Image: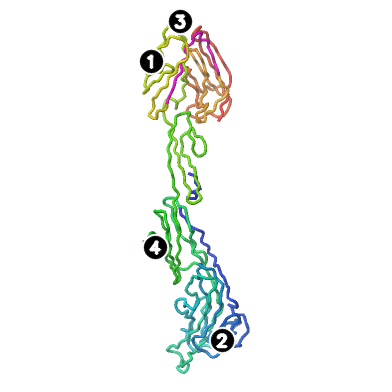
Amino acid sequence: MEIHKIIALGLYILNVLSQNLCFTQFYNGDFNIGSNNCVGPTGWRTNNSQVSDLFQANDFWVDITGCTYGNGNWIEQDIRVTPGKIYYIRVDLGTWSEWDDEDAGVDVFINGVQLGNRLFNDEFSKVPGWRLFWKKKIVSCCFIPVTTQVTVRLTGHSRCTPTSPPAKCASPAPGVIAVDNVELDSFEVSLPEKVCLFKGDKLTYSILGKPFPQSCEWWFNNQLLSSDSIITPQSSGVYTLKVNINCTQFETTVLVDTVTIEKRSYSICKGDSVYVNKKYVKNSGLFYDTVHYTDKCSKIIESTVKLSGGPNNVYKNRTNYICPKTTDTVVLDPGSGYKSYLWSPSGATSRTLKVWNPGIVSVVLMKDSGNCPDSMVFYIGENCLPDCFIPNAFTPNGDGSNDYFPPYLAYVKSYSLKIFNRWGELLYESNDPKLGWDGKYKGELCQESVYVFILSFDTQQSNSTYLFEGTFTLLR
C-alpha cells in the first residue's frame, strides 16, 4: 500500500542534531585583555573596582574576588536571547592553591534569580603550590527566558576548610575565585505543534543541541499518560510534554490528529466498471485515494473492488442462430441452473419460450449470488444465410474487453477451430462455436505474437462446408 504513509507510514520523530549549538555571546568572555590592572574586565559591570584581570601560564582570566580578596564580588553583563529556548552558562573555574580553597565557587544569577546550587571547583590538589587549579567547562542549571534580553551575573565566594590557615579565615574570607571562558549555550526540545498519525503510530520528541540527562512526562486530559520518551497516542487531542532537564522543566503541547481510513466495498459484474481512485476500474483489487484538507489531517479512501462470479466470468458466446423449417414451432431453451428468466420482448419468465415467427428474442438470466446478469440472444432466421466474422487481433489482459479470440458465426453447424503458433504447434482446438481461445497454452500465457487459425464449419440450411485459414495477433 503506497501512501506516502501521508505521510507514514510508523514512528514520528525528528532528526536529532548531535552538534553543539554554541552561542558565545558574552563580550570578552575569554578575557583576552591585559594583566594585573585591577580594574575589571572590559564589557562587564562589577561591584568591585578592584576585580582583577590576571595572567598566568599564557592565559588571561578574571579574579572575581579582586586584588583585595573577598566574598560576594560579582561581574555581570546583558545578553541577547531567544524566548522559549533553553539556555545554560558554561564556565572555567579556578581556585588558588595557597589557601587550600577547594570549596571556592561561583553563583550564577539570571535577572537576579540564582540558577540552582553554587558551582564548585573540586579539582584541588592536596599539594599546595603557587598556582591556580582549574575545573573546565562547568555547566550551570538551565533557564528558559521569556524576554529577548537577560542579565547574567557571576558572584564569587570562598570559604575556609579545616586545612586552611586560621589567620587567613578572618573576614574578608580568603581565596582567589578565578573565571574564564564564560559562554552561553542553548538547545531546544523539538516537538511539532500539530501532527497527523495513523492508528498505532508512535510519537516522541528530540533534542536539538547538546544532549543532557533528562526525564519526561506525557499528559493527556490532565492525566499522566506515560514517563517514556515514546508514546502511542490512542486518541486525537492535545498532548502535553514535560521534560525535566538539568534542574529545569520545559513544557510544550502537540495537537495529535488521526489520519482516517474510510473503507468502501464494491461488487461489479464482468464487463462493468466502477469509478474509484479517480478512474474507472473493471477488475478486482484494492485501490487507494487521498482526500486532503486544509484544517485537518488527510483522509485515505480504501476501495475494495470484487468481481462477482457467474456465467460472464468465463467467456461464452451467448448468441444462438436457429434456422427452423417453415412449419416448425421453435422452443427456445437457455438451459437449467438459473434462478430466474426474463424473455424479451414477450416479458415471459418461464425457462422455455415457444416462437412461431422469424425474429430476434433475448433472455436475461440470473444465476450467481452476486446477481450478475447473463443473457442469451436467439436469432430465428428466415432465409438462414450463413455469416462469419473473424477478428484480426485480441487482448487477453483481463480487463473484460477483447479477452478472447472467437470467430463470430451465424447459422452454422459442425464447427471446428484450431490455433497454431509460428512453428506449427497446435495450441488450441474446439468444436463448440460458443467458446473462444483465452491466449493460454497448458495454463501459461502465450507471448505477444502472430498466430495461425484454421476454421471449418457446415451451414444449417444447405449443409455446405466452409474452410478459412489466416492469421491474427495476440496483444497484451
Q: Earlier in the sequence, mark 4 or mark 1?
A: 4
Q: Position of residue 220 (x, y in %)?
A: 39, 59
Residue 331 drawn above or below residue 189: above
Q: Position of residue 202 (x, y in %)?
A: 43, 55
Range shown magenta: 373-389
Disc 2 element = loop
Question: In which quadrant of the rendered view does residue 425 lie?
Answer: top right
Q: CA distance from mark 1 to mark 2?
A: 118 Å
**Magenta span: helix, strand or loop, mainly?**
strand
Q: Which mark is residue 227?
A: 4
Q: Position of residue 432 (x, y in %)?
A: 46, 17
- Residue shown at 44%/51% (left/top)? 258
Q: Which residue is mark 3?
A: 326
The amino acid sitting under disc 4 is Ser
Nearer to us of marks 1 and 2 is 1
Q: CA distance from mark 4 to mark 3?
A: 94 Å
Q: Which residue occupies the extreme right position in the image?
A: 34
Q: Which residue is mark 2?
A: 51
Q: Mark 1 and 2 residues: CB-CB less than 8 Å, in contact?
A: no
Q: Position of residue 444 (x, y in %)?
A: 49, 30
Q: In this orientation, which residue lies closer to the viewer: 361 or 108?
A: 361
Q: Which mark is residue 352?
A: 1
The amino acid sitting under disc 3 is Thr
Disc 1 element = loop
